[in-house]
Image (cartoon, rainbow, N blue to C red):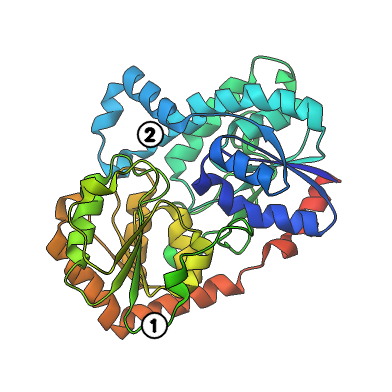
């Protein structure tokens, strides 16, 4: 069968769906990807068939804040409204328009869309192609699911194939691939469409190396620090974290992205190694603690590796519940923005390194993730849908 996999053009959205892409290709299916930006360039260079579909997440945030300035004042529990406006309105419309042309060209038997690339569901329905939603994190709050279903239904009422776009929750497609471990808790009691569990897997291209020093024999722990692939506005956070780690007997691998000037981070301890990008999928097995922003991809990758984590949620709607889930499960700690300072980071990482309870909880979570069906086991379900 021919499968089109659609994702927003950001590494944190593309990489979580690539294990399923590989499983489908290994099963003999013709797999094409629809995404843009730097991920599209890398995947094209790695030999994947890529249809360029551009959607600027940063521009979508700006548009939503200009048109609905009140959303910028919401407390973390209500920030799903920002995400619903971004992903269910602005970005969904952009993807729907572009993917309609891609579908005419690729003529797939099945569309698999990353859950926040919601325009993929509408475009697939217009074309009469079954759609599968691939989760990248926890279930969205029920209010967000309902709001986005209404927005997608409204989007589908105009344009070619409008009569094929269902109303309400059915607009999301036929199946949700659920990567979120039950032990981390849910934001709702059910999903708006049938679900199949699938094991989350960290992924990177084959040619992405890790820093050589990380593979050499070492005598002290390594802390991996990342705030995701978009860190332009997080210099102050990086500075506080690095200052907090300075007095610990650790080496630090800090992936700071391409928008940060190292000079802005201040004096660095001798054990700090700055990198613009590292392949997290290969790093997790070589470090002892992960300090991150609470993003779902980093959280799941570190959890699958059995690593204790310190989460520092900043802005996105999922970062705060993700971070709280780590704390409740016992495999991590979190620091809210108002509590983030070098001393707090120092104490939290010291606890994670020294307290076996956190490591034990992290190993139990890793065991649960390992017990979930791998992507290859789910391929037959997708074949049935396409048939």
Residue highlighted by disc 1: 360
| Above or below for 79 versus 288 | above
Residue 143 placement, left or right of 350: right
First reached walking from the N terminus: tag 2 or tag 1: 2
Residue 165 placement, left or right of 12: right
Residue 232 drawn at (x, y percent): 32, 40
What label sits on residue 81 in the rendered view? 2
Residue 67 drawn at (x, y percent): 35, 18
Residue 293 drawn at (x, y percent): 34, 53
| Above or below for 84 versus 371 | above
Instruction: Judge by depth and name the residue closer to the eye, 376 or 51.
Output: 51
What label sits on residue 220 in the rendered view? none
Q: Badge 1, how many Cα within 10 Å: few under 14, some, many 20+?
A: some
Distance (Cα) linking label 2 and label 1: 36 Å
Does dot 1 land on a helix, a strand or a loop? helix
Q: Residue at x 16, y 64 (%)?
A: 344
Residue 333 location, quadrant: bottom left
Residue 372 drawn at (x, y percent): 61, 69
């Amino acid at each position: 069968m021919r499968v089109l996999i659609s994702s927003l053009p950001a590494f944190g959205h593309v990489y979580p769906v690539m294990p399923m892409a590989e499983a489908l290709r290994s099963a003999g299916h013709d797999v094409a990807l629809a995404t843009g930006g730097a991920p599209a360039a890398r995947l094209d260079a790695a030999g994947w068939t890529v249809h360029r579909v551009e959607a600027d997440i940063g521009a979508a945030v700006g548009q939503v804040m200009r048109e609905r300035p009140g959303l910028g004042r919401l407390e973390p529990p209500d920030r799903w409204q920002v995400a619903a406006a971004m992903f269910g309105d602005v970005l969904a419309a952009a993807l729907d328009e572009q993917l309609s042309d891609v579908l005419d060209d690729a003529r797939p038997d099945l569309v698999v869309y990353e859950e926040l690339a919601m325009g993929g569901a509408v475009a697939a329905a217009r074309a009469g192609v079954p759609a599968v939603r691939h989760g990248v994190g926890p279930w969205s709050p029920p209010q967000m699911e309902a709001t986005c279903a209404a927005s997608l239904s409204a989007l589908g009422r105009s344009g070619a194939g409008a009569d094929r776009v269902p109303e309400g929750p059915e607009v999301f497609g036929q199946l949700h691939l659920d990567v979120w471990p039950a032990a981390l808790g849910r934001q709702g009691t059910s999903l708006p469409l049938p679900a199949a569990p699938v094991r989350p897997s960290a992924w990177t291209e084959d040619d992405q190396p890790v820093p050589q020093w990380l593979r050499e024999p070492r005598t002290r722990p390594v802390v991996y620090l990342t705030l995701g692939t978009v860190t332009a506005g997080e210099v102050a956070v990086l500075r506080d974290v690095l200052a907090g780690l300075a007095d610990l007997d650790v080496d630090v691998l800090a992936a700071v992205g391409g928008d940060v000037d190292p000079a802005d981070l201040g004096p660095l301890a001798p054990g700090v190694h700055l990198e613009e990008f590292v392949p997290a999928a290969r790093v997790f097995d070589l470090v002892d603690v992960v300090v991150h922003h609470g993003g779902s991809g980093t959280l799941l990758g570190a959890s699958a590796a059995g690593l204790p984590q310190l989460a520092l949620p900043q802005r996105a709607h999922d970062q705060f519940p993700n971070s709280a889930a780590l704390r409740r499960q016992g495999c991590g700690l979190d620091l809210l923005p108002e509590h983030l300072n070098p001393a707090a980071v120092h104490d939290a990482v010291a606890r994670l390194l020294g307290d076996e309870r956190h490591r034990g909880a992290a190993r139990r979570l890793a065991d649960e993730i390992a017990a979930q069906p791998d992507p290859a086991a789910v391929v037959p379900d997708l074949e049935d849908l396409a048939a």
